[in-house]
Image: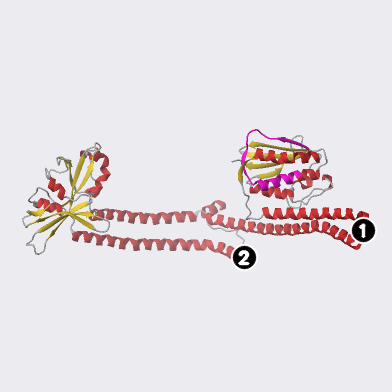
Amino acid sequence: MEKLKQRRNRGLLFLFLKWQLLLFLTLLLLFWCFYQLVSVQLMKKLYLPSPADFLDYEDQLMADDYENITLSHWLDGCLYTVLDGSGTILYRSDETLPEQFSAVQLQCIDGYDSESYLVISRLEGWDGRYFISERTRDEDYEKIGKFCILDEQYNILRGTLFGGTTRLTQTEIDFINGVYGRDYTVSKLDFENSKGEPRTLVLFSPRVDLSQFEQTLINSDRLWLLLIPVFILVLILFGLLVANRLRHYLLPLNAAILGLPQNSTVDLSFYSGPREFAELAQNFAHMTVQLAAAQEEKRRMEQERMQMLMDISHDLKTPITVISGYARAIQDGTVPRQEVGQYIDLICRKAGEVSALADSFFAYCKVTRPTFRAELQECDAVEYLQEYFGARYEELELAGFRPEFSFPDTPLPCMLDRTLFRRVLDNLVSNTIRYNPEGAMLFCSACEEEGMIRITFGDDGVGIPEPIADTLFEPFVVGDDSRGKQQGHGLGLAIVRQIVALHGGTVCLIRPPQHGLHVEFCIRLPMV
């Protein structure tokens, strides 16, 4: 029962936040609905219909299906009529609309998508005459084309705008001014139906009272002034309520975080806050354990680094001591003349060991550098392996080994750094030669396995001692005398692992090896 009560208490934060959020969203939704309702009514008053609104009825216009056009609420109060190319009326939305339009009347109506339009103005000092001009919209200015001059009775005195017409009517003058009667504005839209036949839609929109339009704009601004403070007030109250409740739950976590840099741990195992914060406390406690493990890992890596430096120093000290001792003996003349050549040969061999160790250590440092990248290029793994072992086949036979290979006839495309991957094969072959007696078999094969290239490399020599099998790919891990008298420096397989990783692959020691082999390495590379 106590656990159930505690679990219920730990869920209160979610319930609290949920109900507070629902309350907040409900208030916002109510205000938003109120705003939308009022806005729609205001926008109806502010919206000025145009023929462009009929583009939403393109299907009906193309099919001459005017009966099925249901005007949207934005076009409330609008009337329209549709004419064909000869001026014959095809449809009227209201019987009060004109039963016919003359060519001059249509010419006087401003077109929605037309580049030219008519402008009428009075000529001052010309006894009340009118000047009508056809103007074309341009980027920076208006270009005046045809024109005509009218007297007070709208008789055309001169001009070329309305060819063949001697007098304009009051309706035509109103059309030029964009009005129809006292209640409507007029505009038109020219289009073609699906058969390519010309059509003209004449739209009559209710005229807007400018004073009413301005008052509607003022009311719209007042609506925003009402909604904004209400929203801010609700948001502040919601934030204060949630913040006050959360502060109580966050105090123990804050104390634990502040104490972390000073290593003063805060026991969070008895934290009794909500479930969400309890999980946060649990994760924080887990993080502190991980930090301690990371510090321990850092200490271990530092010890490994120091051990690596000691191993390098040890591996360098022995041959350098031999070189120094033998060189001094030759210099002091304590070496018999007939043995000087042997001493010099030994010095050269030890110098070669130092050089090989330095080269391997340099290669290991280079490939383990975080900024180092392999220069990959696409190639056939089968062809690459055949070329490599073909070049070393005679060398392996002369060294007393029996090379055996198994490569498929089909190519295995992959991305390789040819120089770096040669180092992989060189190190594996060198280990086989170094640690096995003459007569041992050196084996290599390649195949496709689960979308990857599997390269198997092994031998049937003396095998690998079990104590070092788990750490074989670590730096400076070498076998004992059972692997042979000639010892390596222990960096070869560490370099192999790093180079294979740079290719996006993996390398591992197969235990137990397949039948016929005592050592088996498996390299897996991604195929292209």
Residue at the farthest front position: 337
The answer to whether 332 appears left or right of 39 in the picture is: right
The answer to whether 164 appears left or right of 309 in the picture is: left
Q: What residue type is labelled 1?
A: Val
Q: Residue 504: x percent and y percent?
A: 62, 46
Range shown magenta: 402-429
- Report the mark closest to the observer, 1 or 2: 1
Q: Residue 220: x percent and y percent?
A: 27, 59
What residue appears at the point 71 percent right and 44 percent down from the top-left corner? 425
Identify the image quadrant of residue 142: bottom left
Colour scheme of the rendered structure: secondary structure
Residue 261: assigned label: 2
Q: Which amino acid does label 2 sit on?
A: Pro
Residue 335: assigned label: 1
The answer to whether 88 appears left or right of 483 in the picture is: left
Of 21 and 363, the residue lying toward us: 363
Mark 1 closeness class: few <14, some 14–19, many ≥20 residues within 10 Å = some
